[in-house]
Amino acid sequence: MENGLKALLSVQNLKTYFSSDEGLTKAVDGASFEIFQGKTLGVVGESGCGKSVTARSILRIVERPGRIVDGKILLRRGAGVVAQVAGVEGQGVRATRGAWRERAQRQGPQAARRETVIDLTKLDPDGKEIRSIRGKEIGLVFQEPMTSFSPVHTVGSQIIEAILLHQRVSKREAREKAIDQLRLVGIPKPERRIDEFAFELSGGLRQRAMIAMALSCDPNLLIADEPTTALDVTTQSQILDLLRHLQEQRGMAIMLITHNLGVVAEMSDSVVVMYLGRVVEEGPVDDIFHSPAHPYTQALLRSIPSINSMARTKLPTITGSIPHPYNRPPGCPFHPRCPSYIPGTCNQREPGMVTVNDQQRVSCFLYEGA
Amino acid sequence: MTQMAQQNGQILLDVKGLRKFFPIKRGFLRKTVGHVRAVDDVSFYIRKGETLSLVGESGCGKTTTSRCILRAIDPTAGQILFHSEQGITVDVAALPKGKVRPLRRQMQMIFQDPYSSLNPRMTLLDIVGEPLLVNGVGSRQERMDRVAELLRLVGLRPEYMRRFPHAFSGGQRQRIGIARALALNPSLVVADEPVSALDVSVQAQILNLLMDLQAQLGLTYLFVAHDLSVVKHISERVAVMYVGRIVEMAETEAIFAHPRHPYTEALLSAVPKPDPRLRSKRIVLEGDVADPANPPTGCYFHPRCRYAVDVCRSLTPALEELEPGHFVACHRAKELTLAGVAGARRVEETGRA
């Protein structure tokens, strides 16, 4: 709980598994974290750590054979953004349909009077309710804007489609809104660009159009899955500035998924570090970067090449590589690569989350009983 | 340029005025309507045993330059002088097609994507041994011994020789690619983004391996990359490219601490620093990289440059040696004081709440 605010999205012990003939892949294995209104949560981890599957689980777009086997994803609905930022509850509350509210209230005991809390894991992934959340209350920006836009429809028609789906407006109004969105994300000549195809735009413009589409219905939460990985550094800094600017304007929450620690350091308020489907450490961004507690976080921060270091120096490395998901080590998943491995403990039991200081929590036996 | 460098060490590769234009063909008769100037008058040299990095954003011509040097594609104009170990100087650019292969024994390549650059149907023995087989080196037993030696060199166990690439992780695959590149004892290794497809924790391992191998075997690297922090760790000298041209070239420390070209300054400032206390005011470049098929007049960077003056719009600046070993192509390089990164511990307000 940050400053006594209630979390906009709270993921509790989420488990998403993929079963295939070769075995069971625990892509996400007991992840818990919270996202607050107006704040940015950075989710960091290397490939296969489950960060993208977590995002997909929230939106209920996990592909088969993957499925959520356990856990809760609680989304607070109905609270207006303005009211949240000002800390005043009950104002600017958006009207929600009675039926939803009723159902959600039955599920969420901590639901406030006019706000409702809904458990996304309980929804039918193809149902009406999740479709009203997907794209409307939670926007998504994918890594590769080229493959996430349809190549045979204009960029505009795809944004208009999203607007028409979630808002009661005429086609003409939707088009106006789409043009406004494109202008907002800094696309020059949006009246013309709206009728272009994704392949006619440069990488940076395409990612801007993607953001415009994600924001077209004014979501409370934007999930950005590696939004700048496919871009050049100068374009990356444009996009990061844009996201920061839009967040200040609208007060939305951002869940920023990335493997780039530099991007996380620049953008996030708090950070979740994941390794093999588990959250190994979480805390405010300054604590994570300046007093990392988990051996994995420490090793990761040491091993990244930094532009501020001396030229031609050798980097400390993490031994070994990420295990294949089928050969997941027992106990703490990091123990085979861990420099502070305790034989008999780390390879036998799974560590729980321990609080190390105010807001920093870590999943490691070194801190248990401390 | 050449004489100066020769005082500091022997030159292995000397590229002079390299150009590579790709024709744009349109219409029924495939008439050439213009050219993409992918590489436009690029000159640099690499000393024996050093690492030169080519840095730049996508489409700046860094990969095209490296492919021209290996003659994977034919350059449009220019000289690529390779000083081989036998003391012979060859102009790679002018070699007839049939004579390129013997030269390739001395220059090898490490590729970006370790997943697509290894044939999934070949064992490690076949993959790493193929350059030896193609060049007719040794008997079967000798080849096996050499492959075992190479695998050990890159930190893999020789017993893995009979396995297929799918059994290995990304970092291990990149080691296989490095072993293959080293099979023929090359003197020049061109590494095109060798770590950009790898996980952060594995990147460091491969960078360290490349530096170890260089020290052990006296290799010379031409390192092509877009990640400036990686470049800083591996290179002795850095050349920054923008729309087919080198805009700045200098020793690594010099270029990072005291960039002299506005583009280098912006590039350094754009790299996100992995420290929340260093959130600095970044220089955000407006617009996109210029189109190499239709570049702007004068200095290609002027539409995005915050220091641009009239002369930048009309005159193309030449690459000049401002300080010994520090080359810059900018009209205003002498008068500007630009911000670098090394030791830059300035913490500025970000305007964030």
Image (spheres, grey):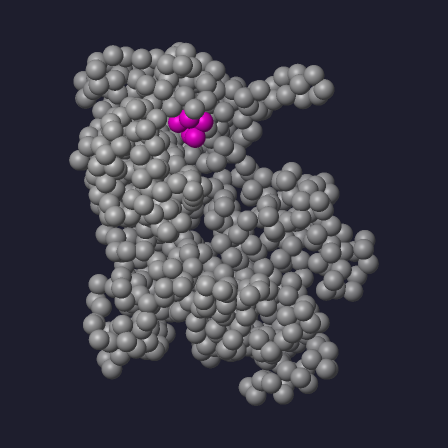
State the image coordinates of residue B311 (x, y, percent, origin top left). Answer: 49, 21
Question: Is B72 drawn above or below residue B201 in the view shown?
Answer: above
Extreme residue in the front direction: B140
Residue at 32% x, 19% y is: B103
The majority secondary structure of the magenta stretch comes to: helix
Give the quarter of the image for residue A221: bottom right
Q: In this view, does A89 lie to the left or right of A269?
A: right
Work out whether residue A306 can be spotted. Answer: no
Residue B337 spot, x, y in % from top left: 35, 33
Is B239 drawn above or below residue A224 in the view shown? Answer: above
Q: Which residue is drawn at 48% across and 73% down?
A: A15
In this rendering, position of residue B88 left or right of residue B301: left
In the picture, the quarter occupied by the C terminus of chain A is: bottom left
**Residue closer to the observer: A95 or B307:** A95
* Magenta part of the chain: B62-67
- Residue at 45% x, 56% y is A258
